[in-house]
Amino acid sequence: MRRYGKHTDEDDIRSRPNRKGNRPRTNIRPKHEDAAEGMVLTVDRGRLTCLVEDRVVMAMKARELGRKAAVVGDRVALVGDLSGKKDTLARIVRIAERSSVLRRTADDDDPYERVVVANADQLAIVTALADPEPRPRLIDRCLVAAYDGGLAPLLVLTKSDLAPPDKLLELYGDLDIPYVVTSRAELENGDAADRVREQLDGRVTAFVGHSGVGKTTLVNALVPKDRRRLTGHVNAVTGRGRHTTTSALALPLDAADGWVVDTPGVRSFGLAHIDPSRVIHAFPDLEPGTEGCPRACSHDEPDCALDAWVAEGHADPARLYSLRRLLATRERTEGD
């Protein structure tokens, strides 16, 4: 047997040939500097529908992204076949940093959080004033998720012909949340869409609401019919027409510069992932008062510095009450 010393001649070393003829594996990944930019419109079973310029392109996530998943609203970089033709598939190689994230858990005991929408500017919380009855605890939970994720909230109250909005609006008056009140007739004749559209221009707005409040009717009135047909065609290929009820879907606004993201109807909105220290950022008038709070203060305990801050006249006591009501919503069920 031939033995080699420390100083061997490379020409003397025999190497096994690569029978497959392919290149050896490497940890160096391509930079994809020529990748095209796009926006994720919807996701279904590993296939992502993206908008690249004016084309709807089907794509899948590249292996090098690992466990990182793209969601509706994500700005992504794509390579491969970007023609948008039938039976073509592109590849998402990068996901841009997100400006906001709307997240939820199935319930308050579920440690697994789900990202619903990325990069949305606004969260429209659609609720009926009657039939079905409004659920303030669900509204509170949506507000907490919006504040935590960096989205500005908007209340859309429907069916005002069945019940007045005064009582519900009074509950959220101290939060200074913009709102739109509509009736069933306005939903049917399009007047509701016109009034809501004024709050959406130039923004990406995610719509949430439980079944029967008129959310889908409103979204359909906001979106041009030709774009709905286009999206419907894509859904039939990738999701068998189930997107409007089972996954979020981004749609362009009609006669306005903006997007609406229709999300599935929610029965609950878990907040297991919420960090109270992030919610306080939505209350700039109270945030300076937290400098004297103990570490990891929940802002609803005896040692919280906000009590003294408000008592000294630095902020409205009603604002502190509203903050604590929202933070306490994790300990209350939505039916309370």
Image (cartoon, helix red, strand yellow):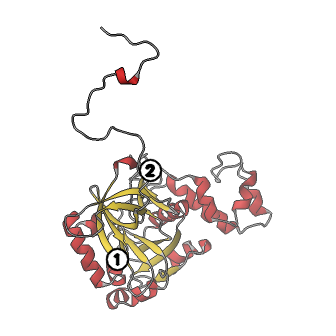
Q: Position of residue 121 (x, y in %)?
A: 50, 70
User: Which residue is found at the position 56% from the left and 72% from the top?
Assistant: 172
Residue identified by numbered label 2: 108
Q: Position of residue 244 (x, y in %)?
A: 28, 69
Few, some or many residues within 10 Å of mark 2 (<14, 14–19, 20+)? some
Residue identified by numbered label 1: 54
Residue 110 appears in view: no
Name the one closer to the observer, 21 or 109.
21
Numbered disc 2: secondary structure: loop
Q: Position of residue 151 (x, y in %)?
A: 52, 67
Q: How many marks?
A: 2
Few, some or many residues within 10 Å of mark 1 (<14, 14–19, 20+)? few
Q: Amino acid at mark 2?
A: Asp
- Compare marks 1 and 2 and give the one earlier in the sequence: 1
Q: Which mark is residue 45?
A: none
Name the one closer to the observer, 298 or 208.
208
State which quadrant residue 318 falls in.
Answer: bottom right
The answer for how far apart the CA atoms under marks 1 and 2 are is 41 Å
Q: Amino acid at mark 1?
A: Asp
User: Which residue is found at the position 36% from the left and 58% from the top?
Assistant: 92
User: Which residue is found at the position 36% from the left and 63% from the top?
Assistant: 266
Residue 209 appears in view: yes
Q: Position of residue 242 (x, y in %)?
A: 23, 66
